[in-house]
Image (cartoon, coloured by chain):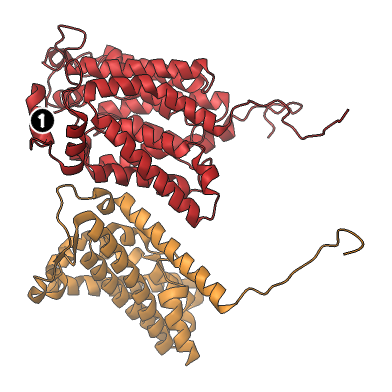
Amino acid sequence: MSEWKNLIVEGLWKNNPALVQLLGLCPLLAVTATLVNGLGLGLATTLVLVGSNITVSLVRTIVRNEIRIPVFVMVIAAFVTIVQLLMNAFIYDLYLTLGIFIPLIVTNCAIIGRAEAYASKNPVLPAALDGAMMGAGFTVVLVILGGMREILGSGSLLAGADRLFGPIAANWTISLYTTEHPFLLAILPPGAFLGMGLLIAVKNIIDAKLATHQQPAEKTVTRIRVTSES
Amino acid sequence: MKLTLSSSPHLHSHRDTSQIMRWVMIAMIPGLTSQIYFFGWGVVVQLLLATVTALITEAGILALRKKNIERHLSDYSAVLTACLLAVSIPPTLPWWMTIIGAFFAIAIVKQLYGGLGYNLFNPAMVAYVVLLISFPAAMTQWAPAAQGGTTMSFTDSAFLIFTGFTQSGMDSTQLTNLVDGVTSATPLDYVKTGLTQSLTYTELLSSDLFRNSGPFQSSAVGWAWVSIAYLLGGLLLLQRRVISWHIPGSMVLSVLIFSSSLYLLDGDRFASPLFHLINGSVLFGAFFIATDPVSASTTPKGRVIFGVLIGFWIIVIRNFGGYPDAVAFAVIIMNMAVPLIDYYTRPRTYGHKKGKV
């Protein structure tokens, strides 16, 4: 069981693809202008991750080592195509909003990274869980960053939720404040980088706090003899 | 007799950081006075607002970083940053934008990089750019340089900044229209818009904005006087040896050279060198912004390269970019190049052969 727990902690926190590995930054920074866009891309990435991890794990014994990377890329591309077609069919508005960033999931290093580092060396179930947890970790960061930028940049939250959840979500949008002068920086790419930097900083602060709580620093006093008496 | 042994350098300037910062602020007085004269008391309100925000932010972050608050605050660097920001922004800017700007300058641009001496970028200019790209409408709304002095009282300016309305209930757009009908405020902005509408530079110069029947009649003349006042302050800094001639000299010269070459190429599509020099913040930037000892190049040769390239970018962005003025962008671009410039222009160390690092 500890292996499973370990996978969850790794994906969501310790080895978070966005905050620690810093993988997949291009979609992360490009689509997180609103929370819903972030969530949509996060879910799509998670689906691809789980699918590719399962498939790679299934074929790991047949695929020769020399050609593994092309095989992984083909597997990932196949899943991205599936996800793209599904989104085109069922959530067309979000599909239009995310645009080029859906096919670009193929190039998300986090996915091939997990296929190479974990799925190709482990059985199916752990590989699936690893994919799901890495995807969840990525999605959480996308959602938080998207939420931050949406609140600062347009003063709303969950704008366009109906694109992802259908007509029932049409009035989910929370309008926090209205202003003549929205803080455009948050919506623009520099805002994404600043927000990302701040999130990483917050994670590092929490990690540092956790480290001091778990291991109270051992008091090792090394005294240097300065005189012959003391 | 007591002989003391100390390590080099044995000869050092008797100025500390706070004295340099204070000299820069003293040198800003002529420019500041002219700005108050032409643009009203709003400048002073912004100055106070930015300074208070900068000091509070600096103190807060120093406390978080467990540094000596009193010692770091008394080096006046935060105050200077606030002053530089306050004179760059429109005097009628809403109060919370000024606060965002000053907070950003100190917290993100200065303290997150490690405080004074470690910041890669000029804090005031990054804050200015952040405000400009975040609130383009408010940041380009300069009231016209009023004829013969201020038309708004101090309380009216404060009311306008804090509530968006003067005491008599007019907002800034109405005011701008009232004074002399020029809404697109700065001459730079006006000429840039006109040129994109395929008017020629000569045609634009004959507009109301530039019509001039007395020394203080038109808005453009007001801007020129502000620039000249900052030039005077800058010369004082040079005379006091607070800054060296390398950066301002090369920057002004390069603005003149690049703008004259464009002007000679096509005098209808590009503004004259003199127009580029006295409008916008070229002179202010050359003496007060680009010379920031932390974020500018440190070697003499490097400073010349730094200044020349800032001038180059100013002319390129002003003529071919989207924004009317470009000093802040140019300075930030060149701030990024400073480590490289410094690396390649390291002076020869005494006793070492040239070319060997």
Residue B267 quadrant: top left
Q: Find disc 1 in the rendering and name its residue.
A: B175
Of residues B84 and A37, the one drawn nearer to the viewer in this rendering: B84
Quadrant into which the N terminus of chain B falls = top right
Residue B94 quadrant: top left
Image side of residue B20 versus residue A165, left or right: right
Measuring from the top left, give residue B125's x and y in whole percent.
37, 36
Instruction: Count neighbours of disc 1 (C-alpha within 10 A) and say few if under 14, some if 14 to 19, many if 20 or more.
Output: some
Residue at the spot 73% in from the left edge and 26% down from the top edge: B350
Q: Which chain is orange?
A: A
Measuring from the top left, give residue B345's x and y in whole percent.
58, 29
Residue at the spot 23% in from the left edge and 21% down from the top edge: B38
Residue A115 visible within the image: no
In the rendered image, the residue lying farthest to the right is: A228
Q: Which chain is red?
A: B
Image side of residue A21 versus residue B103, left or right: right
In the rendered image, the residue lying farthest to the top is: B213
Residue at the spot 14% in from the left edge and 6% down from the top edge: B213
Q: Using the image, name the chain to which the residue with label 1 belongs.
A: B
Measuring from the top left, give residue B271's x and y in whole percent.
24, 17
Of residues B16 and A4, the one drawn nearer to the viewer in this rendering: B16
Measuring from the top left, give residue B7's x and y in whole percent.
76, 35
Of residues B68 and B223, the one drawn nearer to the viewer in this rendering: B68
Quadrant into which the C terminus of chain B falls = top right
Image: B148 above or below B284: above
Image: A215 above or below B229: below
Residue A90 visible within the image: yes
Residue type beneath disc 1: Leu
Image: B293 above or below A213: above
